[in-house]
Amino acid sequence: MSDAGERKNPESEKIDWGERAERKQEDMETATIDKCTAGELLRNAHIGLSNPESDIIRCSLVAGDFLYFHYGCDGQDDRGWGCGYRTLQAICSWLQLNRPHLNTHDRPPSLPEIQQALVTVGDKPPSFSGSREWIGTFEAALALDHFYDVPCKIVHLRRGGSELEGVADELHRHFQTQGSPVMMGGDRDNSSKGVLGVCTSAQGSHLLVMDPHYHGPPLNREGAQRFGWVSWKKVGSLDHSSFYNLCLPQIARK
């Protein structure tokens, strides 16, 4: 089982949040970006990003270190289907860096390892291993339980951005008590996202979003923020015709 939209063609009904259109590879290659060492993943991509509003009432952020996983970052070309896996890997990196007693691996699981785990727990048929099928928040929750014995809370929002304003308080509580990144997926807006924080002002709430859809040479923090791969998104800019699921790891008592 996965978020419904993740069974659709990823090129159909792709949602643009308004600030970042899909960037051509040649634009990234000509941009002035300091490259990381080959194979190195960006740590804490959100540090230094300004608050989205000047009149913030409450702001809650991820606590601790994590890595930015994105399309192709490990040499596997997963463009068009791997965004959910990459968001899951970012959460796994947070667990390994901040909850070392939970570690059963020396690194976050690879895409083939995630697929095999979902077959092992009985959620997917054997043909799922080695496929290009998407995963959503439900599969991410199963994988986190399998690899780290970490349960997750799934929050289902039927009316998209309009309903998400109503769970801003729950996101604040999550970041203040659990501290981990959150995975977000939907149906019409079928692109997986990592949520690293929430800020609330008198005008509404913003989510701090980490977008795994970048494909290209390693980015440094300035490049990831400048090109919008890590940025604040107003909740009202979410697709109001899409449902959304949030996967909130529950690790406070672990």
Image: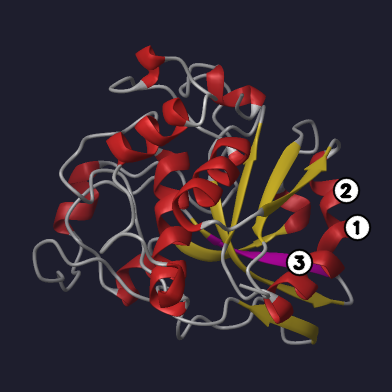
What residue is shown with label 2? 163
Residue 205 lies in the magenta stretch: yes
Q: From which residue to which does the magenta span run?
A: 204-209
Residue in front for this viewpoint, 222 or 147: 147
What residue is shown with label 3? 171
Q: Identify the main secondary structure in magenta.
A: strand
Q: Is residue 154 left or right of residue 142?
A: right
**Is 124 rendered above or below residue 70?**
above
Q: Secondary structure at mark 3?
A: helix
Q: Where's residue 45, x and y in %?
A: 40, 73
**Is 92 rendered above or below residue 185?**
below
Q: Is residue 183 left or right of residue 248?
A: left
Q: Secondary structure at mark 2?
A: helix
- The answer to the question of whether label 1 and label 2 lie on touching residues, with beta carbons closer than 8 A, is yes
Give, as a three-letter code, the residue at label 3: Leu
- The answer to the question of whether label 3 and label 2 lie on touching residues, with beta carbons closer than 8 A, is no
Q: Earlier in the sequence, mark 3 or mark 1?
A: 1
Indicate the quadrant containing the N terminus: top left, top right, bottom left or bottom right. top right
Give, as a three-letter code, the residue at label 1: Gly
Residue 129: numbered disc: none
Residue in front for this viewpoint, 130 or 60: 130
Give, as a three-letter code, the residue at label 2: Glu
Q: Where's residue 68, x and y in %?
A: 36, 63
